Image (tube, rainbow, N blue to C red):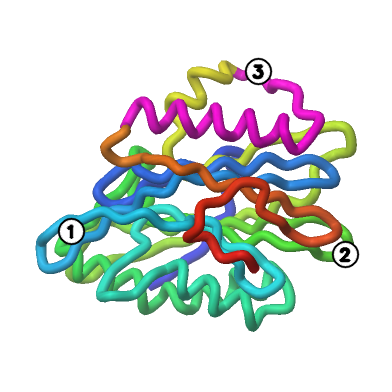
Amino acid sequence: MFTRRLIPVTFILACVVPAYGTSIVILRSAKTLYIGADSRRSYRETGEMYEGSVCKIVPAGQLLFVASGLTYANNQQVASIGAEVGRSSPTVQFAIEQFRDKMRQFLPQAIAAQGRVESSARKGLILEAAFIGLEDNLLSVSVEWYRTNGNVSKPRIKSDRRTYSSAVPGRYDFIFLGKRKAIDEYLGGRFPSVRSDNGAISLITRLIDLEIKESPETTAPPIDILAFDGSGWRWVQRKPGCPAS
């Protein structure tokens, strides 16, 4: 059973199985949006855990997709679902609605496959997903949080949503998915100045590196970074596993 409740959250927090793994940083300005992510993902199959290096920033047609939390179960990847939905969606809002319908089936089955509910420090939070795109010359980020009451056999899943439009000219802000404890301690409410691609790359790399140093067993390099503006998106730093387009 899905219900929806909108809450005014500025910063986003979630985890990857087994816990607290993914670190994704979205840095928004009025004209450009930068996305950075670490590369480690953990999987569980038939009671066993193993790790792989993946690209967590996923091209999805004219959109981009990112996710953190319960993102793999029953040989199915949430990233693949997001990419498929994005390729057939004309807008970010349409994509997030279609994705939500897909999660109605995926999440209960994923929880059953895990045999337990694994959530972050925010009560019941098991998955976050976001679509990013350009609409009416405005950069748009639509994020949905999925929570459960923790009942494995009959999980009740709730979803909350927020859409962020382009930032105010002359200003920028952050959206975080995944690990951010070390980031919060470093920023301390301050906002370093960013004036160029190189500045954004340097800051995002520094922030995610803090999380990698704190939990190297669950968060690992390389760090992939992508820029999105009115002309489309482009990689500014990527490993060979990230698709060129």
Q: Residue at x 67, y 67 (%)?
A: 63
**Which residue position is annotated with label 3?**
190
Mark 2 is on which residue type? Answer: Asp
Q: Do the residues labelled 2 and 1 touch (CB within 8 Å)?
A: no
Q: Label 2 crowding class (10 Å Cα cut-off): few <14, some 14-19, many 20+?
A: few
Residue 243 colored in magenta in the image = no
Q: Main secondary structure of the magenta part?
A: helix
Q: Quadrant of residue 216?
A: top left
Query: Considering depth in this image, is 207 or 69 the residue closer to the camera?
Result: 207
State how far apart marks 3 and 2 are (Cα).
Answer: 31 Å
**Which residue position is annotated with label 2?**
136
Residue 192 colored in magenta in the image = yes
Q: What stretch is highlighted in magenta?
A: 189-215
Quarter containing the N terminus = bottom left
The image shows residue 127 at horizontal and vertical percentages of 41, 57
Mark closest to the chain's N terminus, 3 or 2? 2
Mark 3 is on which residue type? Answer: Arg
Q: Quadrant of residue 72?
A: bottom left
